Amino acid sequence: MPRSLAIGLIAFGLALVPHFAAAGDALQVTNARVPASDEIGVNLPLLMTIRNEATEADAILRVRCPFANFSERHTVDRGEGAPAMREVRSIPIPQGQTTDLKREGYHVMLLQTRQKLVDGEKFTCVVVFQKAGTRETEVQVTRTP
Ligand SMILES: [Cu+2]
């Protein structure tokens, strides 16, 4: 390949990077956290805040964390009895809003933890959004999430 063509291709590639970064910034994940636990093999809620400034609604499809075997998306039903968690296909992330995942509402449930989780530890989890795609998200272990 002629040298000038190679340089041109590299410059073209670099020019694309800021464009993709700007598009991704329309959806921001912050304050992702999971409660500390001395037990192994338990189920723990993963909570986070999602700001969606994109032009359309989004949804959380899947989450994967290195310290849990599985995850589900949950909502909480309040009927006549005690509130009960129920699995849902996806967690809706409305456009132009800030969505807080909560124990008493939509949240991600991490199933079968593989290790103890100590207050202050940090992990990288992967959150897959329907529109925004796959996001690596830092998750903090907290005593009171
Ligand atoms: Cu749950």
Image: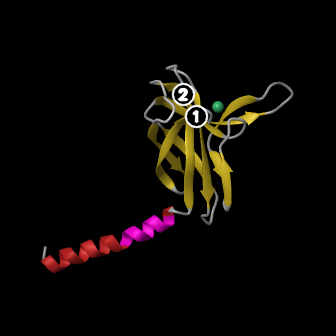
Q: Where residue 29 appears, x then y in whole percent?
A: 55, 52
Assess whether residue 53 is covered by the magenta stretch: no
Extreme left residue here?
2
Looking at the magenta stretch, what is its main secondary structure?
helix
Examine the image and state in which quarter residue 81 appears: top right
Residue 50 vertical position relative to residue 113 in the rendered view, above or below: below
Q: Amino acid at mark 1?
A: Glu
Which residue shows up at 62% across the image and 33% down it? 144
Examine the image and state in which quarter residue 104 appears: top right
Circle 1 is placed at which residue position?
Answer: 72
Q: Where residue 119 appears, x then y in whole percent?
A: 51, 32
Disc 1 packing (10 Å; few <14; some 14–19; many ≥20): many
In magenta, the rendered stretch is: 16-23
Q: Earlier in the sequence, mark 2 or mark 1?
A: 1
Is 34 placed left or right of 88 in the picture? left
- Residues at discs 2 and 1 in contact (Cβ within 8 Å): yes
Q: Where residue 37 appears, x then y in whole percent?
A: 54, 25
Circle 2 is placed at which residue position?
Answer: 111
Residue closest to the eye, 85 or 117? 117
- Judged from the image, the secondary structure of the residue bearing numbered disc 1 is strand
Disc 2 packing (10 Å; few <14; some 14–19; many ≥20): some
Give the numbered dot on residue 26.
Answer: none
